[in-house]
């Protein structure tokens, strides 16, 4: 079985191995010690033994001693002998020497000692079984010696009883010693086993601990890194960028420098991810981060704020030209296309810039200022930039507040149409334009200039427009029921609503709901709203017309309609915008433009409504130019539904003659 790196070995196997190795090592140590001690003792006793043996004529004893001594010396020097063989040799040599001495003389205490010692040595090396075997050998040797003595094969005669007693003593003591040593070794083996287990457990814990420490170190490092960095691009994240900005600001403050923070957002990034996929989006973000990081100076810094937004610190800005240079530099990052899921995509970005110390002293303030500048830049279209401006910022904050309030106002249906009369050349009310008013909780009114754009951008205009259309139709029906003239009512339709696929069905259901005669309903659509896609617009307009209502082009002449398409527009009227009317009649050029637009509309069979008529002179000029209807403060401002009903019933006070 292969073991993966870092994996702990099988603890049981390790334990057994440890136990074996422990015991073997112990035995080998004892064997070596015994050998050394035997040699030491042998060496010390060598001279006296030789002298005594020589003097007493014990030649055999001398030879035996010499053989055993040399054998022990050989064992000691020749260490590579397998250990078991060494043990067997040590025990065997002892037993052999003892036996030889036993045959040699009757009274040899040395023989008994050698035999007992061999039994002990055998027990040490081979356990109780070794001791028993040597005990048996010793018994046999004594029996053989006794038999040989009886058979007179020996040079001496043994007394049977005393010899048997001696044999019993030697064998008994040998067994006793063996038994004691075997027990000791067993105890030691148990201790080794416990030590082994402990050691294995300790090893395992150590490995676990090391692994845990290593794991924790990398996890902690990673967590610490991710706390201040973006995992995808490796750049500082918002938090990390704020810290960097704080540092850069401290340096700028100390050196009296101007510092610029640029926040940039990739244009239409959501569209890229929804059409090309998340992977393509991630690839673009990584590449953008890399290119930005490469484009800046060493002591500047790039971060990713989240989503498609990046931020850059330019730590030393000296002049207005430097800001231009900064923007050009950032734009160049987007000159080349970006690799995205196997293809190349052109990506652009918008930029917002804020400057220290003018636009903020603290990191958060500066970053916030740059972000709101970016928000405004985005509204200018892709690839735009804005430098922070306090007045704009205030407007932006106001917008955020209004956007927030719009939600609850829509839920409470706090919008009410007011009606501005449209009059004929005699000043008679011949129509009305519904203009949204937001009823505030404090009883005040909020005008469309404060919220229509915001609602248009957030999409809230759909609901708002539906509420106004519904209420305007209801009022028109009410007036008719009250016996007032059934004049047409115009309702503004925003470009957002006009683009909606549900527009026709929604208008149809409101007509059905309120019971208004559709021919009394006129929808005003700005020319710019129609122009986004002229062909589709013509179809949409035609579809609306099938409901039986009227359609007008609001602010006609400001939206660059192509003359070729104009003739195909299925509309009833066009509205001459206030901007065309205002300079009349003194401004000659403006008069010519207004005259040309009126003529063009008439030639295309559209009736013309002049807006923003404030003076009699304007009215006179427009009347001369044969406008069909007029709308403006000269006749009436927008009126609440109730006041409009009065005006409808009684006529306007300033009827023109
Ligand atoms: P608009 O459709 O061009 O409406 C005419 C605007 O000119 C109205 O402003 C009106 O009050 C104002 N006005 C009329 N006569 C005069 C005049 O003689 N002098 C001056 N200075 N102004 C005059 P208002 O009501 O503030 O509406 C502004 C714009 O908001 C409208 O311009 C229209 O585009 C939009 N709007 C208003 N109500 C709605 C609505 O319900 N839906 C949508 N989509 N847009 C609306
Ligand atoms: Ca209008
Ligand atoms: Ca208008």
Image (cartoon, rainbow, N blue to C red):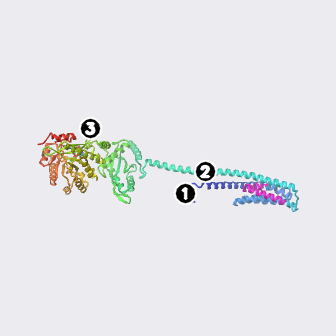
Is the shortest distance between ligand 1 and the CB of mark 2 under 8 Å? no
Q: Which residue is mark 1?
A: 4
Q: Residue furthest top?
A: 442
Q: Main secondary structure of the magenta part?
A: helix
One can see residue 606 in this view: yes
Name the mark on residue 201: 2
Q: Which numbered disc, 1 or 2, marks the residue that appears first in the sequence?
A: 1
How far apart marks 3 and 2 lie (CA) works out to 80 Å
Q: Is residue 399 above or below residue 105?
A: above
**Is residue 10 rendered magenta in the image?**
no
> What span is in magenta?
116-145
Task: Work out which quarter of the rendered image holds the N terminus and state it.
Answer: bottom right
Tell me which corner region of the image, top left, top right, bottom left or bottom right, holds residue 129.
bottom right
Q: Which numbered disc, 3 or 2, marks the residue that appears first in the sequence?
A: 2
617 lies left or right of 442 = left
Label 3 element class: loop
Residue 525 position, x and y percent, is 23, 50
Q: Which residue is mark 3?
A: 444
């Amino acid at each position: 079985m292969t073991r993966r790196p870092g994996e702990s070995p099988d603890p049981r196997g390790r334990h057994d191995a440890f136990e074996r190795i422990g015991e073997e090592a112990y035995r080998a140590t004892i064997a070596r010690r015994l050998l050394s001690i035997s040699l030491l003792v042998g060496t010390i006793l060598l001279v006296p033994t030789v002298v005594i043996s020589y003097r007493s004529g014990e030649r055999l004893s001398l030879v035996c001693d010499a053989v055993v001594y040399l054998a022990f010396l050989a064992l000691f020097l020749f260490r590579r002998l397998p250990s078991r063989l060494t043990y067997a040799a040590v025990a065997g040599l002892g037993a052999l020497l003892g036996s030889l001495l036993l045959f040699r003389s009757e009274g040899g205490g040395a023989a008994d000692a050698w035999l007992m010692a061999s039994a002990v040595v055998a027990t040490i090396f081979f356990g109780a079984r070794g001791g028993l075997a040597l005990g048996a050998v010793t018994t046999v040797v004594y029996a053989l010696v006794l038999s040989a003595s009886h058979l007179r094969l020996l040079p001496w005669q043994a007394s049977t009883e005393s010899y048997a007693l001696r044999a019993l003593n030697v064998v008994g003591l040998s067994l006793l010693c063996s038994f004691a040593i075997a027990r000791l070794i067993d105890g030691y083996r148990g201790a080794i086993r416990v030590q082994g287990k402990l050691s294995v457990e300790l090893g395992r814990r150590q490995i676990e601990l090391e692994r845990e420490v290593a794991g924790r170190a990398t996890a902690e490092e990673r967590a610490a890194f991710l706390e201040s960095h973006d995992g995808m691009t490796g750049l500082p994240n918002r938090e990390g960028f704020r810290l960097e900005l704080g540092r850069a600001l401290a340096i700028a403050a100390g050196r009296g420098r101007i510092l610029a923070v640029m926040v940039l957002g990739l244009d239409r990034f959501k569209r890229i991810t929804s059409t090309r996929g998340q992977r393509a989006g991630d690839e673009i973000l990584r590449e953008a981060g890399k290119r930005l990081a490469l484009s800046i100076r060493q002591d500047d810094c790039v971060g990713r704020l989240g989503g498609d937004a990046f931020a850059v610190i330019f730590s030393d800005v000296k002049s207005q030209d430097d800001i231009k240079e900064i923007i050009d530099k950032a734009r160049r990052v987007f000159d080349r296309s970006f690799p995205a899921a196997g293809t190349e995509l052109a990506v652009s970005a918008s930029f917002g810039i804020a400057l220290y110390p003018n636009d903020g002293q603290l990191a958060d303030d500066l970053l916030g200022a740059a972000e709101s500048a970016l928000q405004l830049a985005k509204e200018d279209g892709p690839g735009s930039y804005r430098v922070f401006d306090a007045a704009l910022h205030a407007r932006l904050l106001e917008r955020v507040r209004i956007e927030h309030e719009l939600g609850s106002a829509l839920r409470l249906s706090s919008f009410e149409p007011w009606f501005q009369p449209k009059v004929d050349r005699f000043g008679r009310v011949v129509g009305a334009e519904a203009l949204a008013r937001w009823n505030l909780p404090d009883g005040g009114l909020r005008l469309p200039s404060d919220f229509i754009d915001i609602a248009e951008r957030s999409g809230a205009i759909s609901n708002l427009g539906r509420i106004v259309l519904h209420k305007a139709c209801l009022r028109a029906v009410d007036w008719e029921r009250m016996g007032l003239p059934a004049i047409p009512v115009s309702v503004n339709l925003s470009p957002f609503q006009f683009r909606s696929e549900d527009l026709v069905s929604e208008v149809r259901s409101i007509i059905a709901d309120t019971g208004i005669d559709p021919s009394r309903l006129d929808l005003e659509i700005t020319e710019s709203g129609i122009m986004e896609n002229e062909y589709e617009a013509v179809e949409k307009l035609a579809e609306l017309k099938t409901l039986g209502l009227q359609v007008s082009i609001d602010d006609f002449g400001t939206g660059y309609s192509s003359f070729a398409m104009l003739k195909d527009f299925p509309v009833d009227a066009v509205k001459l915008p206030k901007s065309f009317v205002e300079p009349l009649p003194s401004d000659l050029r403006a008069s010519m433009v207004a005259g040309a637009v009126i003529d063009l509309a008439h030639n295309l069979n559209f009736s013309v409504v002049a807006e923003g008529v404030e003076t009699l002179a304007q009215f006179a000029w427009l009347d001369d130019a044969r406008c069909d209807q007029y709308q403006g403060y000269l006749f009436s401002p927008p009126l609440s539904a109730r006041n409009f009903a009065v005006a409808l019933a009684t006529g306007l006070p300033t009827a023109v003659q």
